[in-house]
Amino acid sequence: MTILDKIIAHKRQEVAERQSLVPVRRLEQSPYLQAQPLSLSRYLLRDDLSGIIAEFKRKSPSKGVINAHAPVERTTLGYMQAGAAALSVLTDTEFFGGRNEDLTTARRFNFCPILRKDFVLDEYQILEARSIGADAVLLIAAALTGAEVLRLGRFAKSLGLEVLLEIHNEAELDSALHPDAVTLVGVNNRNLHDFSVSLDTSGELARRIPAEFVKVTESGLTSAAEIEALRAVGYRGFLIGETFMRHSRPEKACAALVQQLRATEAITLM
Ligand SMILES: O=C(O)c1ccccc1NCC(=O)[C@H](O)[C@H](O)COP(=O)(O)O
């Protein structure tokens, strides 16, 4: 049993419980449903932004507690001020120490696309994502069938949310890539069996992802040189969590990385 299997088993139970506590009609009353979501893909394609999706995560299965004290407001606002193009907020509690309120707080303090980072299995979670102020959701190919990606992706689209499809290999790409439902493809560099990280995964899969999808590289990124190397093979989004969150002031670590990127002159107008 992989860590993903464990997370998914727990999530199924959690979603069933939550649905009985917070019915769909309550989610539908959220004021965020009246607002127009921001486009994550458009922000990542902007040449005047860094392409960094800065993540707020307190702990993870691979690293345990990373940062239990950073406040969501100061961190996410700091990320934006530092030059991140978008935010990712972990809302899973059991394995990542997040909560829905973290995303809502980030939403209140920021005007940029926000990805709800969670383990989506059901339409309910997508409506919930919209109701807490998210602009995009993650669908993980390793946790879903191709038909489920299509169904959930279409539902997300009907609510105005973009879908970032996460893959680890070619087989997942082939089974889950539905142009009708997916806008961005994220290659996760972390092997969920042994937690090893290899940026070669992104390097190797880049040319397999059709040009119409915005390419995002996820996990294990630590430097401007790595970002530039992956930008050169077509990536426009760079999802970074731990490299920032392991600092007591994650937003300062983000600012330092954006500075390094600026020094390479890859970002012309920032
Ligand atoms: O981070 C983990 O340990 C993990 C384990 C199992 C499933 C997902 C996991 N992480 C979620 C993510 O995708 C990362 O938080 C994200 O890509 C950022 O990665 P990093 O920059 O390495 O924190």
Image (tube, rainbow, N blue to C red):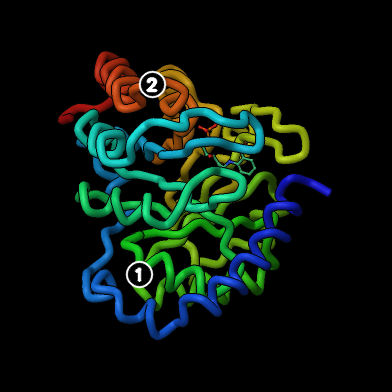
User: Sequence order check: which comes first, mark 2 or mark 1?
Assistant: 1
Q: Residue at x 29, y 48 (%)?
A: 106
Q: Which residue is mark 1?
A: 131
Left or right: where 74 falls relative to 135: left
Query: The disc labelled 1 sits on which kind of residue?
Result: Ser
Query: The disc labelled 2 sits on which kind of residue?
Result: Ser
Residue sticking out furthest to the bottom: 25
Q: Are marks 2 and 1 in contact (CB under 8 Å)?
A: no
* Mark 1 lies within 8 Å of ligand 1 (Cβ measured): no
Residue sticking out furthest to the left: 269
Residue 269, picture quadrant: top left
Q: Looking at the image, which is closer to me, 67 or 171?
A: 67
Left or right: where 126 falls relative to 51: right
Count of marks overlaid on the render = 2
Q: Which residue is mark 2?
A: 248
Residue sticking out furthest to the right: 1
Position above or below: 223 against 94: above
Residue 172, given in percent of the width and then of the height, sits at: 69, 54
